[in-house]
Amino acid sequence: MPGSLNPLATEPGQPAEGAPGHFGVTHLALIMDGNGRWATRQGLPRLAGHRAGLEAVRRLVKACIERNIAFLTLFSFSTENWTRPAEEVGELMRLLRFFVRSDLATLNRQNVRIRVIGEREGLAPDILRILNEAQDTTAANTGLTLVIAFNYGARAELVRAARHLAAEVAAGRLEPSAITEATVSAALDTSGIPDPDLLIRTSGEQRISNFLLWQSAYTELVFTPALWPDFDAAALDAALREFSQRQRRFGGI
Ligand code: IPE
Ligand code: IPE
Ligand code: MG
């Protein structure tokens, strides 16, 4: 089935597809939404919501490891999130730095491999350094692959891929007729990562917000009213159960 194969599934330390507990979800993608509303409802500044959201990230990573999910992609900062007030953007950058500094050793010990997707150009040098450090430190790990979508937007990703392929054609290394779905997939930031089986969005919003547009062509969508800081293992299990009841047809019968 296109995109549903985990090429790493038979390597040591990698859960086999269909392993108990994850209901056949090899790749879980998550739009972590609702931090601001969570804070506002409690009379706290939005920044408090982002801090509580980080706790939810830690919980979820642990839950995914326990459930043998092979890939977890977290939408942590979108290309459009730069339009937020400078103070909030600054806090989100600070939280990313804090997360890598405080959690990288633990993640490494948990055999988690970190991969970052999104636009690198224009990021502050210290943020770039930290993202690279997270990837390099965990590059040889064989457990959960944690894909951090940071400064990520699916349209921008598709534009980068188109430019790359156009440059290959212009250089005479690629025939336009040789461009296939596989070529495009391989030119995306998610190259080598199977398409998500399940995409969960918290906070009740029912939209994709420019996340993994190409990759989620046949992804099952689950929208949950829980605000991200309240999302826990029980909420994850409810979404996995809902996924397990879906019939995926991929255009067939
Ligand atoms: C998600 O929570 C976190 C990011 C987008 C970085 P929000 O900050 O979007 O929270 P709401 O949607 O305003 O409640
Ligand atoms: C999507 O949430 C981006 C992230 C979770 C990082 P937003 O809160 O930015 O999305 P919209 O603006 O409600 O569509
Ligand atoms: Mg939001």
Image: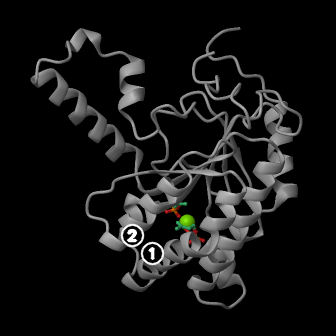
- Residue 124 versus residue 112 in the image, above or below: below
Colouring rule applied to residues: one colour
As shown in the figure, which amino acid type bears the numbered disc 1? Answer: Met
Q: In the displayed structure, does residue 150 sit left or right of residue 124?
A: right
Q: Position of residue 13 (x, y in %)?
A: 74, 38
Residue 127 marker: 2
As shown in the figure, which amino acid type bears the numbered disc 2? Answer: Ile
What secondary structure is found at the residue carrying circle 1? helix
Q: In the displayed structure, does residue 165 sit left or right of residue 204?
A: left
Q: Nearer the viewer, residue 178 or 228?
A: 178
- Residue visible at 34% across and 38% down in the picture: 158
- Residue 87 versus residue 229 in the image, above or below: below
Q: Nearer the viewer, residue 213 or 157?
A: 157
- Residue visible at 86% across and 48% down in the picture: 238
Q: Position of residue 152 (x, y in %)?
A: 42, 53
Q: Kindly indicate the quadrant of the structure image that contains residue 39.
A: bottom right
- Residue 125 versus residue 206 in the image, above or below: below
- Residue visible at 69% across and 51% down in the picture: 111
- Residue visible at 28% across and 40% down in the picture: 159
Q: Is residue 118 visible?
A: yes
Q: Kindly indicate the quadrant of the structure image that contains residue 123.
A: bottom left
- Whether residues under marks 1 and 2 lie with C-beta atoms below 8 angstroms apart, the answer is yes
Q: In the displayed structure, does residue 171 sit left or right of residue 203?
A: left
Quadrant of ligand 1: it is bottom right
Q: Position of residue 58 (x, y in %)?
A: 71, 66
Q: Which residue is mark 1?
A: 93
Q: How many marks?
A: 2
Q: Residues within 10 Å of mark 2 (few under 14, many from 20)?
A: some
Q: In the displayed structure, does residue 171 sit left or right of residue 50?
A: left
Q: Which is closer to the viewer, label 1 or label 2?
A: 2
